[in-house]
Image (spheres, rainbow, N blue to C red):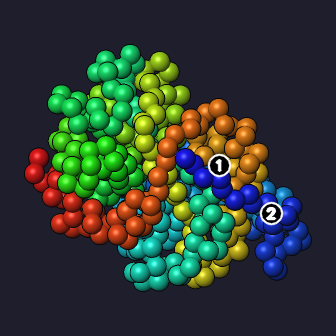
Amino acid sequence: MLSRRAIVRFPAAFLLPAGVGIATAQQRIELLNVSYDPTRELYAEFNAAFAREWKARTGQVVVVKQSHGGSGKQARSILDGLEADVATLALAGDTEALVRHGGFVQPGWQKRLPNNASPYTSTVVLVVRAGNPKGIKDWEDLARPGIGVITPNPKTSGGARWNYLAAWEYARRRHGGDAQAREFVSRLYGNVPVLDTGARGASITFAQRRMGDVLIAWENEAHLLAKEFPGRFELLTPSLGILAEPAVAVVDRVVDRKGTRAVAEAYLRYLYSEEGQDIVARHFYRPAASRQAQARYARQFPTLELFTVDQAFGGWEQASGRHFADGGSFDQIYTRK
């Protein structure tokens, strides 16, 4: 089950770093938030709220620009020179790549913020077309012959990695071990007609291109689809879910060069504020830092059995090396199609 998360409360003036006061001369500050696909709407609202709060407390105008795509692809873009002040990626492993390659993020970044730098969580659900014409109920049905499954490419998408590992662990528990899980996941990906690079692309393929019978999606992305296309889709909660813990980090190498560390750090801390947590929940992410927000939005988040990557796979380093590295299980499975 979903574990109880720590409560985080910041004082009223938490936005004010040392040396910044109300009398600071007004100036325009720009931040770039490099994120993954399904957070577009979340950060559009959050950025505006943060900008209002920052200006009220400091007199400074801050403009936050957004970049979205598959999480792994976004991490590589930062390594290739995309000047992100903050990285809000789908999985900690993608942020760790910014530590290992070039020191873009300093070691220990997950200890700088509460909940291992995860202000919100999510899980993976199934989306089917209205009336559920193929009678899909759980993970087991996704490996049946004749079922079209839409999910993005785990080589480029963090969300796709959550999807893959959720299916693998379901099959390992249901069918008795890793060999059986491999066979099940191979059959599932045999039903995948196209691999989009990110979660939003997969949603477009399913909803607008009308491909497939079922979409494996982030919980928040599934709710957004149902909201955008009322009456066209149904959301199914599988019997076993993975606890997705997207993490956020300041990109140290960029903010120190640009002089934007203070506002970038405040931006991430604001995700833990009551307003930030409320915005998170309105966009169908599970608030991790506020019991008040958890209580207000409890009805929209069904309770299900959840496991973590650490519990099932020994952490992201082991999971990535075994399943998603070149020549790993995904390559072996998908190249056999």
Q: Splitting the image into 4 quarters, where does residue 239 fall?
A: top left
State the residue position of label 2.
10
Q: Is residue 226 left or right of residue 325?
A: right
State the residue position of label 1.
287
Q: Residues within 10 Å of mark 1 (few under 14, many from 20)?
A: many
Can residue 197 be seen here? The reply is no
The answer to whether residue 336 is above or below residue 217 is below
- Mark 2 or mark 1: which comes first in sequence? 2
109 and 263: which one is in front? 109
Q: Secondary structure at mark 2?
A: loop
Q: Residue 325 got which mark?
A: none
168 and 272: which one is in front? 168
Q: Residues within 10 Å of mark 2 (few under 14, many from 20)?
A: few
Spot occupied by residue 252 in the image (x, y as percentages of width and height):
56, 79
Q: Which three-letter amino acid code belongs to the residue tagged 1?
A: Pro
Spot occupied by residue 180 in the image (x, y as percentages of width and height):
21, 49
Q: Is residue 29 left or right of residue 141?
A: right
Q: Secondary structure at mark 1?
A: strand
Can residue 95 be seen here? The reply is yes
Q: Splitting the image into 4 quarters, where does residue 109 fall?
A: bottom right
Residue displayed at 43% across by 24% down: 233
